[in-house]
Amino acid sequence: MKALLLLWLGGVALRLTILAVPPVIPLIHDDLHLSETQVGILSGIPMVLFAAAAIAGSLMVARLGAVHALLTGLALCAVGSVIRGVGPHIAMLYFGTVVTAFGVAVMQPSLPPLVRAWVPQRMGFATAVYTNGLLVGEILPAALTIPLVLPMLHRSWQWSFVFWAVPVALIAFVIFALAPRPETPTNGATPRNWMPDFRNGLIWRIGLLLGSVNATYFALNGFLPDYLTHTGQADLIHAALTANNVGQLPASFMLLISAERLVRTPWSYIICALINAVGLLMITLMSGAWVIVGAGLLGCFAAAVLVLILALPPLISPPDEVHRVSAGMFTISYSVAVIVPIISGALWDYTGWLLAPFIPMGVSMAVVIGLAPTIVLRDKSAGA
């Protein structure tokens, strides 16, 4: 139970400081006189770092162990979030964002090895637990910053970053104090290999699976408001985005019960991707409340695929390879998640067709359907 609590707290910390930015962007925009391009850079930095620095996370796991890599990432997240409030100055804001995102990039490859080390008999369940924490970490700053945190801090966006750094620091302290020790791989020695083997087709397949889901989520959040505005449904924006984001929680709770079984079944991924495709069709071909329902379906079943894919590295890898496979998966997936929204935007600009940005999202779901049957899982005891 203690291990599951620590994994859940680690999942919460993955997103708290990252998702603290969107609610205060209007205040930052006014105070620092940002252009829309600068706002775009601020929003894009985390995604780029998640892809570029995942291998650094694998190196830290190999050299320091997964617990110490996680603690390092937590410290960087907390410090980076505080740095963002120094100034105020655009350079410090960018620098703090880089430090924060680097911390998250280090943390992400550390959690799958901890799942295998701490909960080896229930890896799917443990992954669902920390992914539930991740989703809670996404929702808390989005839900609480504007109505609660900013009024309490006299509408200071700088101090709001400090506010969200505090729970991350507390989580680091709790994990430092309570994490099971010693943390060693099953062969009794710290793993030396850290560079992902990008010649391994399996890493590419699970990276593309995760990237397709991430890309759909981020692209939908990016383009849905403009799409609804252009179709005369601007009044649905808040409800649709809320449904898309809060809709992720039911999936994570359901998978706490069934992840162990569903993660090994290709049909689980395929059915979720098909329902996501139905959600896209509801958004693009229907109107009114159906748009909100479609956004909720996308949020729910994209989160389900997310949980299942995050459970794959400890299941398909020997114990001393989990960090490498995880880092390779995150490098590929977040690269895809950066590229697909750009393609969606370019298609819309080039064609002027309102439905154009949704085409790459549909293709992403087709990728999930096509790749799911190619994932071969090892037996739980393999490599143990």
Image (cartoon, helix red, strand yellow):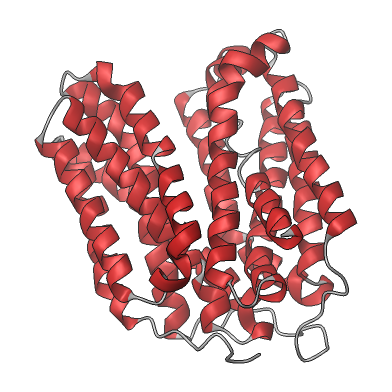
Q: In the displayed structure, would residue 103 be above or below residue 225?
A: below
Relative placement, left or right, of 256 versus 278 is right
Give the residue at x 29% y 33%.
224
Q: Residue furthest left?
A: 285
Quadrant that contains the N terminus? bottom right
Q: Quadrant of residue 231?
A: top left
Relative depth, front residue between 212 and 346? 212
Q: Quadrant of residue 70?
A: bottom right
Q: In the displayed structure, would residue 300 be above or below residue 223?
A: below
Give the residue at x 49% y 73%.
312
Q: Is residue 300 visible?
A: yes
Give the residue at x 58% y 32%.
140
Relative placement, left or right, of 348 versus 110 is left
Q: Is residue 335 visible?
A: no
Relative depth, front residue between 42 and 137? 137
Q: In the displayed structure, would residue 266 be above or below residue 297?
A: below
Give the residue at x 51% y 82%.
316
- Residue 367: where, in percent of width, then height? 27, 67
Q: How many marks?
A: 0
Quadrant that contains the C terminus? bottom right
- Residue 87: where, in percent of width, then height? 77, 22
- Residue 36: where, in percent of width, then height? 46, 25
- Residue 114: where, in percent of width, then height? 70, 69
Relative placement, left or right, of 252 versus 60 is left
Q: In the displayed structure, would residue 246 be above or below residue 254?
A: above
